[in-house]
Image (cartoon, coloured by chain):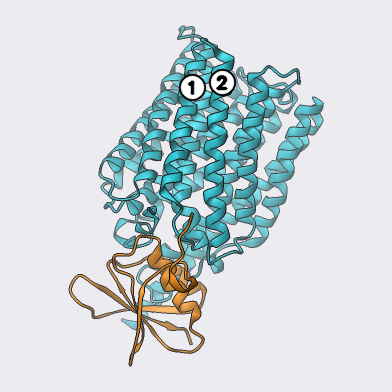
């Protein structure tokens, strides 16, 4: 049996959103990416032993998770899923409305955390939860009407279920800062972290990979049966982790969850490796080097999770786990994929109806991506070193290098936008002169 | 884990030659085989022979891939319910 990834390839035009919608989400993500590194620089002195609590490191963490990861996931899934599951775009107004609610909400959450202003944080949290609730409804409607690609759709449902847990725990944690008590901070944080990173974001990343990786590698579709086994194990791992959060048999349940998660990831990695090895396009450049690094760091995050679960006597283990999981796996993967998606979508939108559209390679900008590649990996390495050595100066250096990389990535994004607009303008001029 | 089509190809697609070029019918193929089959055929052609594609839908995301390798596509008349494309190496 084969995945229905090619439904994505065929018949895309009628299912495309106007470019302004996905690109406004991507643009906001690019801006929040830079702000996240700047916030981390502002709070660098507490990064090496960060263990939660209001301040700029928490703001930087949420600028990445909400501002970059979820922002991009919303834009990408609203654009890709209707195409992949062979459905028309039902609404352009709702995605735009979600962006207008979500983007300032993220800013308020980050400022509330950074400046330790609980009311601002709570106000932002309400906006973010409302926007993500709206997105969840759009996603659910899309998944209900999906045709084909059952394992991708199942990943979508599992991510959606995780999002519900994330939103409930987020509201409860935000309310705790205003003096309302919830179900217990430790349990809520554990559920919130696991279901955000491995659940909502992780499952969306794994599911969308079954579409995107064969598409970019020009390979045959991955084996569906193994993809289902991988998903089943991933969901089992999440449920075991949730059971462990309740406090019963905590250590054995966490270790079982990590074991199931590791096998799920190994299966997924194997399927992706086969697609990359057998595809017509073997040279996928720096973007897929980042994707490969991200897969390796996903495994490393599980090893670190094991260290946390076994209470390994290593200072900063929980912080290191967070860096590997959020920065190493999710952010690295997303930036690798985003630098391929943006020029590809721009090519499709650059000159609609053209016999020969602008090529993705003519729209992209290699130099900023080269700078970003080096800076991003160096910044992650410096942050990990800062945690291991407990050095504030190394953490500052890491945040500074990360900021340079994020600025370079923003440069890449704006160059693509400018070239897309120029292609559109030139096509319009040619049509006008032909008419 | 990934099946190859006969003849060492990644994806199948019925191929035949007519006076107007090499034809490939990718209708009914499990995705992403249509895209892969078309690009495999296009990349195997060393001269200016056109390729005629018989498809179920307009393969919008094929066009950036074709542009990248210097090929163009135009829609031509086909059977009802069919999207027929003529692909040519750009001059």
Badges 2 and 1, same chain: yes
Q: Position of residue A296 (x, y in %)?
A: 64, 42
Q: Earlier in the sequence, mark 2 or mark 1?
A: 1
Look at the image and give the colour of chain A.
cyan
Mark 1 burial class by Cα count in 10 Å: few <14, some 14-19, many 20+: many
Q: Residue extending furthest front?
A: B6
| Placement of the C terminus of chain A among the 4 image quadrants | bottom left
Q: Is residue A56 visible to the viewer in this orientation of the structure?
A: no
Q: Are marks 2 and 1 in contact (CB under 8 Å)?
A: yes
Q: CA distance from mark 2 to mark 1?
A: 7 Å
**Which residue is at a point 52% across and 26% down the rendered structure image?**
A194
**Which residue is at a point 45% across and 25% down the rendered structure image?**
A166
Q: Helix, strand or loop at disc 1? A: helix
Look at the image and give the colour of chain B.
orange
Q: Position of residue A293 (x, y in %)?
A: 65, 46
**Relative to A52, is B18 above or below?**
below
Q: Which chain letter matches label 1? A: A
Q: Which chain letter matches label 2? A: A
State the mark number for residue A348.
none
Q: Helix, strand or loop at disc 2? A: helix
State the mark number for residue A240.
1
Please indicate whether residue A381 sits to the left or right of residue A18 in the image.
right
Q: What residue is shown with label 2?
A: A254
Q: Residue extending furthest bottom?
A: B19
Residues B66 and A361: in front is B66
**Relative to A370, is A280 above or below?**
below
């Amino acid at each position: 049996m084969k995945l229905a990834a090619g439904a994505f390839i065929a018949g895309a035009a009628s299912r495309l959103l106007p470019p302004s919608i996905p690109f406004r989400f991507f643009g906001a993500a690019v801006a929040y990416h830079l702000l996240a590194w700047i916030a981390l620089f502002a709070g660098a002195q507490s990064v090496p032993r960060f263990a939660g609590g209001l301040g700029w490191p928490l703001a930087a963490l949420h600028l990445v998770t909400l501002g970059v990861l979820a922002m991009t996931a919303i834009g990408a899934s609203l654009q890709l899923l209707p195409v992949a599951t062979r459905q028309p775009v039902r609404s352009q107004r709702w995605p735009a409305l979600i962006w207008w609610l979500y983007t300032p909400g993220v800013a308020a959450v980050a400022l509330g955390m950074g400046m330790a202003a609980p009311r601002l944080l709570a106000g932002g949290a309400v906006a973010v939860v409302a926007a993500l609730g709206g997105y969840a409804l759009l996603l659910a409607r899309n998944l209900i009407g999906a045709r084909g690609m059952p394992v991708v759709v199942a990943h979508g449902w599992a991510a959606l279920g995780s999002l519900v847990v994330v939103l409930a725990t987020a509201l409860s944690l935000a309310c705790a800062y205003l003096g309302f008590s919830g179900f217990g901070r430790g349990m809520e944080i554990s559920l919130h972290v696991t279901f955000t990173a491995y659940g909502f974001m992780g499952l969306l990343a794994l599911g969308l990979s079954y579409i995107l990786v064969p598409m970019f590698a020009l390979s045959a579709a991955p084996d569906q049966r193994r993809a289902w086994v991988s998903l089943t194990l991933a969901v089992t791992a999440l449920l075991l982790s949730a059971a462990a959060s309740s406090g019963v048999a905590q250590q054995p349940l966490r270790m079982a969850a990590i074991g199931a998660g590791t096998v799920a990831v190994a299966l997924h990695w194997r399927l992706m490796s086969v697609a990359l090895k057998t595809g017509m396009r073997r040279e996928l450049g720096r973007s897929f080097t980042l994707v490969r690094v991200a897969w390796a760091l996903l495994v490393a995050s599980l090893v670190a999770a094991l260290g946390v679960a076994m209470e390994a006597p290593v200072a900063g283990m929980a912080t290191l786990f967070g860096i590997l999981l959020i920065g190493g796996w999710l952010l690295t993967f997303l930036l690798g994929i985003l630098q391929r998606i943006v020029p590809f979508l721009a090519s499709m939108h650059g000159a609609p109806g053209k016999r020969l559209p602008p090529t993705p390679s003519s729209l992209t900008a290699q130099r900023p991506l080269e700078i970003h590649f080096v800076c991003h990996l160096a910044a992650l390495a410096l942050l990990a070193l800062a945690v291991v050595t407990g050095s504030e100066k190394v953490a500052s250096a890491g945040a500074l290098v990360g900021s340079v990389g994020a600025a370079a990535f923003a440069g890449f994004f704006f160059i693509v936008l400018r070239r897309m607009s120029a292609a559109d303008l030139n096509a319009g001029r040619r049509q006008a002169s032909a008419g | 884990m990934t099946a190859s089509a006969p003849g060492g190809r990644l994806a199948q697609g019925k191929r035949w030659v007519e006076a107007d070029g090499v034809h490939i019918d990718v209708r009914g193929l499990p995705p992403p085989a249509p895209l892969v089959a078309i690009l495999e055929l296009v990349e195997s052609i060393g001269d200016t022979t056109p390729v005629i594609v018989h498809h179920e839908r307009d393969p919008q995301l094929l066009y950036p891939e074709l542009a990248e390798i210097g090929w163009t596509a135009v829609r031509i008349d086909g059977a009802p319910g069919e999207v027929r494309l003529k692909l040519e190496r750009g001059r």
